[in-house]
Image (tube, rainbow, N blue to C red):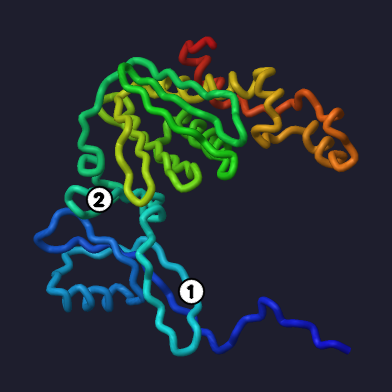
Amino acid sequence: MTKPHNRGKLDLSEREVTVRLLAARIVGRDGWHLEESTEDADGFRAVLAQRGLSVAELVELYDYVVRTKPGESFVPNQCFHNSAYREGWGRDAAADCWHSPYELDWRFPGPTVAVDRLDVTYALPEVGWIDTAIRAGERVIEFSISEVYDPVPALLDWLERLAEGSFGSLFMDVEGWYVDFHVFVQDGRVRFVVEEGDYGRSVTLDIRIDRIALLAGLYCPLVALWESDAFACAHMHWDFASAERDAWDAEWKYLTDETDPVRLTPTPIRSPRIDTVLRAAGWDW
């Protein structure tokens, strides 16, 4: 009998190493210094002290475990930027430092513009991309969302929280480029900030707007797209959930190009919770 291969079997000679992302406030410097390290908090303080840096405050953002081969030491690659952004931190390239999630004045110094409405356009999908344009007053930003990292479910969850008066951030991966939405209360309205970038982010939109106007501006045109016949006919360009698609996918290998469906009905994304909030605010669409 042939002995089976042990593919994927754990190599017991390997060792586990814990890598931490640590944020240190350095005496005499602005903001925070972020760095991955295999040291714990005390060890990291000692490392910084050897560099002549005094630590006023230290925070551990997260940790993860890696495996190293015998005789090898793990060297962090410092490619943590997008993870740090998802933890709510923001990089200040000009000052060469980071700011914490609670330092909004530092992260988003403005200027910010007050607007009464938000006009958003979601184009019909094309080969897995939905071109998106957001207009706020005289400012227009454009980006495309990707089917590969479909952000629509997360966007709807974020909008439902916004409808209920909860605020926070939404992070969208558009295949090597990131678009981040942030909403927080300021001066009796909400402040809506959009950041874009890769390892660094730049603010591309910064406005103050009524919460319901922001909610309607982002939500209503998305639902209108989803419920349109044109979107149903674009099923080859966006892999939306659909009972019809499930049935078709099960039979596709028996079908010819001539029997491909003209349209498939998307599973609705309309949110009763958001609709209730919009109706209560007198928003008739």
Question: Are the residues tagged 1 and 2 within 8 Å (C-beta)?
Answer: no
Number of numbered discs on residues: 2
Q: Is residue 77 left or right of residue 244?
A: left
Seen at 76% across and 27% down, the residue is 264
- Tell me the kind of residue under disc 1: Val
At horizontal 49% and vertical 21% (from top left) the residue drawn is 121
Locate residue 273, reporting x and y percent. Answer: 56, 26
Q: Secondary structure at mark 1?
A: strand
Amino acid on which disc 2 is placed: His
Which quarter of the rendering shows the N terminus?
bottom right
Real-space CA distance between mark 1 and mark 2, rounded to the nearest whole angstrom: 27 Å
x, y percent for residue 69? 50, 84
Which residue of the protein is positioned furthest toward the front in this rendering? 257
Residue count near mark 2 (Cα–Cα under 10 Å), binned few <14, some 14–19, many ≥20:
many
Which residue corresponds to the image point at 16% horizontal and 64% vertical from the top-left?
56
- SS at circle 2: strand
Q: N-terminal of the two: label 1 or label 2?
A: 1
Q: Nearer the viewer, residue 79 or 35?
A: 79
Q: Is residue 18 above or below residue 58?
A: below
Residue at image mark 1: 66
Q: Nearer the viewer, residue 266 or 209?
A: 266
Q: Position of residue 283 (x, y in %)?
A: 49, 12
Instruction: Give the image location of residue 237, x and y in percent.
Output: 65, 32
Mark 1, mark 2: which one is toward the viewer?
1
Quadrant showing the C terminus: top right
Which residue is label 2 attached to?
Answer: 99
Q: Crowding at label 1, few (<14), some or many (≥20) Cα neighbours within 10 Å?
A: few
Q: Which mark is residue 88?
A: none
